[in-house]
Structure formats: structure tokens, C-alpha cells
Image: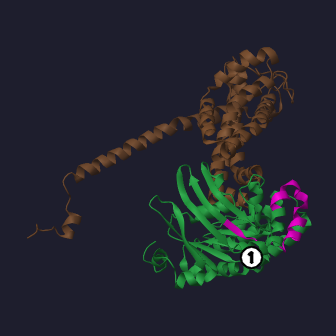
Chain colours: A brown, B green
Amino acid sequence: MSTPVASIAKLLTQPTSGERARQRINWGMRVIVGVAAFLAILPLIALILFVILKAAPYLVPTFFFNNPLDKEPGVLNAIVGSLQLSGLTVLISGPIGIAGGVYLSEFASPRVVAIGETVIDVMLGVPSIVAGVFAYLILVPVLGFSGWAAVAALSILTLPIMMRSTQEVLRLVPQAIREASLALGVPVWKTALFVSVRTALPGILTGVILAFSRALGETAPLLMTARGTNAENWLDFSTTMNAMPIVIYQYSNAASDLLIGQAWATALILMVIALTINVLVRGRTVNSRTA
Amino acid sequence: MATEKRDTENATTGAKDELAQAAARPAAQAAQRASASEGDSGRLTLDNVSARYGAFRAVKDVTLAVRPKSVTALIGPSGCGKSTLIRTINRMHETLPGATVSGSISLDGVDLYSSDVDPVRARRVVGMVFQKPNPFPTMSISENVSSGLRLTGGTSKSEIAGIVEDSLRRAALWDEVKDKLNQPGTSLSGGQQQRLCIARTIAVKPRVVLMDEPCSALDPVATLKIEELIRDLATEYTIVIVTHNMQQASRVSDETAFFSMDDDRAGYLVETGPTAEMFTNPKQALTEGYIQGRFG
């Protein structure tokens, strides 16, 4: 009547044709992707180990608290310079970038949003050397080599980051929350500010911190604008300023073991700051997601 | 209908005044709300209302008179435009891109869509409770209740504390939350959150409260509590409630309007009448079929 059906026991225990080969291919694939994954993180491990080992002997208090021309030279002026440049960059581009993101998310028509998003994509793709060359050829002739020119160049790079992150976290605010506010008779702009932005605030601040971290590590625009100096500069953005990436670049070419060592040590500081920021931000996002 | 309108003419001036002037003098609003609350009726009249999403007409030519200080239930199968229709009453429909409304909706004789009624003002007079409880996640319980007052301005801090307590009592939530007013609104259970949203809505002293399936995300016990609350609120507010649950409509409403949709998927009003009559002796065969569970 019907073809005989194999017993369940037989189906479970008897190998089907090609089963052995499949198992071998499976095993082989696992080895290949495993090795590839290891090769991918190998440079990172090597980099971290090298930086730590090379930097360790030079991490003495005077390195952190003295300036390059002191008897026991250090890179204090580069550390404070970097923090000031990145800080001012975020202070200037932050409000503008956040406002732009709020506009795109809460007010703009779909057409304007499409145009705005394309512009942001283009801006995100601008290589930092291009921002540097713009500042060098257009701003430096007017402002001179200065903190202002550096902040302008860095802002070109951080603005789209903050616009994009603001727009994206606002998009995660449920429409129901906005409607609840509108239905209470709250005007649109107050709803945008005190409900949407307020709800997305942790995410918006995360974007600001990431932009700060990006500005901190940029090198090319700084070499062409702030240029570096041996002097300690507090808040005088009208003249040259030192920064950690500049120190790393210049010292690593120097004919001096001390300076080369300090280049490694400065690289370590930069790496630790950037890693700390990234880990903190990661913790925040994970927390806010589970909350 | 016409005679009724004349009878309530005196009473209508209160809401009319409020709609026409309130926004110009936000500071005077609180006083005005207090003084205007007695006389006016809260009569809602929909005349030939159609609502569209772009070219698609979701609601077609609805004409409906809603009795003041009573509960009117809108029932009908999914997708027949009930939610769209109530969103036209507080001018929320037009906040969606491409969404438009035609026809007229008037409250105590004032056309909510006339040029001298700002949509923001219309929403202060016509409050709304949504399908899913949507307390503001960044605000505490008490801040949620006072959010409308704080964000629209014109109410002093000292007044706000009293209004928060009154509104929470009115929403039958006070006893459950009085010791944790500073905890996040989202820490409450679903049913409590929905009562919090009701408290938030009545805190701004609307005249009409729209409810869009307010119990569909709640369990039966929480649903029963909200239903009791709706009955209680009807002594003070004109309530329009959309519901999928016919038992709910029969339990809470005084009047029922039954909607269906035509071949173009446009929702239209089939018939309306006192709830008891609609459920025992509907005039239209379509209504009878729906109520007896033959479709929908």
C-alpha cells in the first residue's frame, strides 16, 4: 500500500550519506574562523602590549607634571592642551549639533530629513586631513596657528557625529510619549524640548562624550593648526597650543631615546583616556537599555 | 436637537470663552478654568467628519451628537476608523504627516477647526487617554500628573501640589501611590500606569476626555477598576471611548455608536443610540450581526 517507513531507532542512529563529510567540513570551518578571529585581535593585543611595555619606564611623576623645556621634561602642556581643545570643540559644536539633530528628528519635513541625512553622511565621510587642509589654507591665514583654528577644524569633524547621534536617540523615543504631551495641550516646541529631548538625554550625552573622544585622538588637523608648542597654554586659544597627538607625532621622529619613550608614554595616556571613555559609554548604554 | 441647543445657550458661553481667549493670557487660565467649570455643557457635535491619510479616506462623513457628561462608546470591527475619528476630536490626527480632516467638530457651539482655535488650546479642553499606558519615563508619579500644568505654564507651585492630589484621588490612585509620589511613573503596574495617565489628563481640567481602547493592554481586574473610574468621571466630563470589547461598551457607556467599513475600507457610522437599546434591539442588521458575534 505505502512504502515501508524506517523505524525511528534506525532514523536516529544510522548515519545518512554525506553525514561524515559534513561533520568534517563543519569542524574545518570552525578552525578557520577561529584562527581568523585570533589573527584579527592579534594586532590589537600586540599594540597594547607594546605601548605598555615601551611606555612603562617613562611613566614618572615629572612626565605628567612638567613641561617639555623643564629640567625633567614632561608633557603636561600637551595633556592640558588636548583637553582644552577637545573640550572647547565639544562646547561649540555640541549645542549646534544637538540642535541640528533635534530639528531633523522633531521638526523637519521628510524631504528635509532626507537631504539633511545625506549631508550628515557626507560630513561624516570627510577625512580629517581635509578638515585640516581647509583650516590651514582658509583659517590659519586669518587666525594664525592657533587653538581657534584647531577647534574649527575639529568641530567640522565632530558636528556630524553629534547631529547623527542626537537624531538617532530621539528616533528611539516612542511616538506615544510625544503624543501624550501634545494631547495635554503642550506646544510642539515644549514637547520637543522637555519631553523628547529630556527622555533621550542620556543618549544625547553619550554622543557628546564620543565626539569628545574623537576630537581627542585627531592628529592631522592639529598639526596644521594648533601646531604644538613647548609652552604651557591655559585658555589662550589665539596662539599655538600643544596636544597629545602632536607630541606623539613629533617625538617619535626625534633622535633621543627619552623623547621616543615619551612618545610611547603619551600614546598610552591617550589610549587609556579613549578606552576609559568608551567603556564608560558602553556601560551607560547597556544600563539604559536594561532599565 | 434645535430646542436643546437653545436651552443650553447660556451655559455654552463658558467653554466658548475659554476656547477663544485662553492662550492669550496663560496666567489667567487657572482662575478662568475654575470660574468657567460650572455652567457649560461640554456638548460635542460631529458634522460630516471625514479623515484622510494622504489620499486614503479612513473615516467617511460621520455625523454624531455626543451627550454632555455621559459616556459614548464607539464600537466596530478593527480598522473601521474609530481611533482615527476620536483623534480628530482633539486635533491629534493632523499631527501625522499627510493627515487631514474635513467637516466640522464643535464643542458647545465652537468649531474646533475654526481659524481662531489654536490646536494646542483645543487639546487642553479635549483630553485624551491612549491605548497603551504612556507615562513620561523620565518623570516621577507626581511629576507625571503635574506635567501638563508645568509644561503649559500659568499654574503656581502651591496650586500644583493640591491639583496633583486631587487628580490622583479622582483617578482612584491616591491611596496606592501617596507614599511614593517621587518614584518613577513607569515603576507602577500597567493598570496603575493607565490610572496615572487618566490623572495626568484630568489634571489640566479638560471638558471632554477621549479614551482610545484604554483597557486593551490591561488584565481583567485592572480593566474593571478603569471601568468604574470611567463611570465615575462621567459625572463631570463628557467621555468618548473607543473599545473592541462589547461587554465593556455595554458596562460603561450610556450611548453606543456602531461603525463599520465600506468597500473602500473607509469607516462610517452605521447607527447610534442608547446603549441598552443598541445591545437589545439594534435597528440595523449589520449592528445586530456584529453584536451577536457573527462578524468583526
> Is disc 1 placed on a helix, strand or loop?
loop
Q: Is residue A152 above or below residue A277?
A: above
Q: Quadrant of the N terminus of chain B?
A: bottom right
A99, A187: nearer the viewer: A187
Q: Quadrant of residue A127?
A: top right
Three-letter amino acid code at disc 1?
Answer: Ala
| Residue B24 in picture, x, y percent from top left | 87, 54
Q: To which quarter of the image does residue A289 belong?
A: bottom right
Q: Which residue is mark 1?
A: B171
Tell me: residue B119, above or below residue A273: below
- Is residue A14 inside the magenta stretch? no
Q: Residues within 10 Å of mark 1 (few under 14, many from 20)?
A: many
User: Magenta residues, as a range?
Assistant: B18-45
Quick one: which residue is furthest to the left in this view?
Answer: A1
Number of numbered discs visible in the structure rendering: 1
Q: Residue at x 78, y 25 (%)?
A: A242
In the rendered image, residue B36 lying in the magenta stretch gets the answer yes
The x, y position of residue A273, in whole percent, is 70, 39
Residue B157 visible somewhere in the drawing: yes
Most frequent secondary structure within the magenta stretch: helix
Q: Position of residue A228 (x, y in %)?
A: 77, 21
Question: x%, y% of residue A245?
Answer: 70, 27
Q: Is residue B123 left or right of residue B224?
A: right
